């Protein structure tokens, strides 16, 4: 295999690997982050102290179980017990949705909030305790997307790493290939961070009720915190490796010491001049 063919093949493999980075990270985040109930509850736990989230919870529960529940829920959100109820509610909702996604069926996903309300000191007689959290059409779409992301969450990162290693291995100049891979990884991390920011803007813009945007923004930021961290890590690691490769190539090669005499040519190898 000639050097030109090896360089072209290496460039193609590295380019494919870097293109998979912005897609593999979100897929792994969904499959191993959002799909884990404990991690989901831990990520949302600090939002129990957010006033926007507290008001949004009171409005949502009142809209589902009736206006008599609004004073009870609004009072509850201002107490220390709300943190316990918030974690229990998020755990119940996550398990219900995840069970519906994995088990199948075409029905509305509901959660009974009576056991959650029973954990706090302030109790009230709620007219209805079944709260709908996901309609049937949305469940069908979520199930299709989840099936795809569950597979992609494992194979996309593995494929990206395999392509990158193969691209560096077949390269004629492996240091240059490693530099290109590092820069491509940093670019992929930057694109991932940009996608998270654009997704936040689009998510909040699509909300019909502007009053709920602060709460929705807080939830979005809490859930995508890991993705933002991963994007910064990819940028930092990629740039660090690229700079290291550049410094190694520029200053790492041995040089002749100063003051050393220039090599003397072998007289036998010098061309003979024709005598006049």
Image: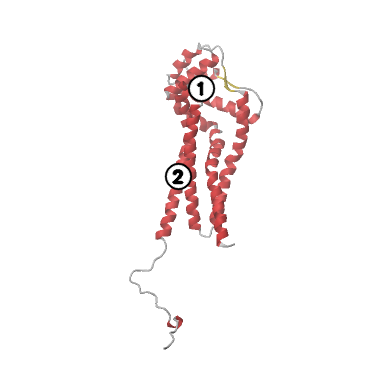
Residue 228 at x, y = what percent? 46, 37
Q: Residue furthest left?
A: 259
Label 1 crowd bin: few (<14), some (14–19), many (20+), radius 10 Å:
few
Which quarter of the rendering shows the C terminus? Answer: bottom left
Residue 210 position (above or below residue 231)? above
At a point 54% along the width and 51% down the height, the residue shown is: 14
Residue 258 position (above or below residue 239)? below
Q: How many marks?
A: 2
- Work out how far the residue at label 1 is from the one at label 2, CA to CA, in angstroms: 35 Å
Could you say which quadrant of the image residue 140 lies in?
A: top right
For mark 2, give the secondary structure.
helix
Residue 77 at x, y = what percent? 45, 19
Residue 34 at x, y = what percent? 54, 33
Mark 1 vs mark 2, foreground winner is: 1
- Residue 235's tag is 2
Q: Residue furthest right?
A: 105
Which quarter of the rendering shows the N terminus? Answer: bottom right
Q: Can you identify the residue that label 1 sits on?
A: 208
Q: Are marks 1 and 2 in contact (CB under 8 Å)?
A: no
Residue 224 appears anywhere in the view: no
Residue 16 position (above or below residue 258)? above
Q: Residue furthest bottom?
A: 276
Q: Nearer the viewer, residue 189 or 162?
A: 189
Label 2 crowd bin: few (<14), some (14–19), many (20+), radius 10 Å:
many
């Amino acid at each position: 295999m000639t050097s030109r063919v090896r360089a072209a093949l290496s460039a193609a493999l590295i380019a494919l690997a870097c293109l998979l980075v912005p897609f593999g990270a979100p897929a792994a985040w969904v499959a191993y982050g959002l799909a884990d109930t404990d991690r989901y509850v831990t990520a949302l736990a600090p939002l129990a102290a957010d006033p926007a989230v507290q008001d949004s919870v009171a409005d949502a529960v009142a809209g589902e179980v009736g206006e008599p529940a609004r004073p009870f829920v609004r009072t509850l959100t201002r107490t220390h017990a709300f943190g316990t109820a918030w974690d229990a509610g998020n755990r119940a909702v996550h398990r219900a949705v995840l069970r519906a996604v994995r088990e199948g069926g075409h029905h509305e996903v509901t959660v009974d909030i009576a056991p959650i309300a029973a954990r706090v000191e302030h109790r009230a007689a709620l007219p209805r305790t079944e709260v709908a959290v996901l309609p049937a059409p949305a469940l069908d779409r979520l199930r299709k997307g989840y099936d795809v992301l569950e597979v992609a969450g494992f194979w996309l990162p593995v494929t990206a790493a395999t392509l990158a290693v193969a691209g560096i291995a077949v390269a004629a100049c492996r240091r240059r290939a490693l530099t290109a891979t590092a820069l491509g990884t940093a670019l992929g991390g930057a694109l991932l961070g940009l996608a998270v920011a654009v997704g936040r803007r689009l998510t909040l813009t699509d909300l019909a009720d502007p009053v709920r945007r602060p709460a929705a923004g807080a939830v979005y930021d809490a859930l995508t915190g890991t993705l933002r961290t991963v994007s910064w890590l990819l940028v930092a690691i990629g740039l660090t490796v690229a700079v290291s490769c550049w410094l190694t190539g520029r200053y790492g090669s041995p040089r002749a010491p100063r003051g050393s005499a220039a090599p003397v040519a072998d007289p036998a190898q010098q061309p003979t001049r024709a005598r006049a």
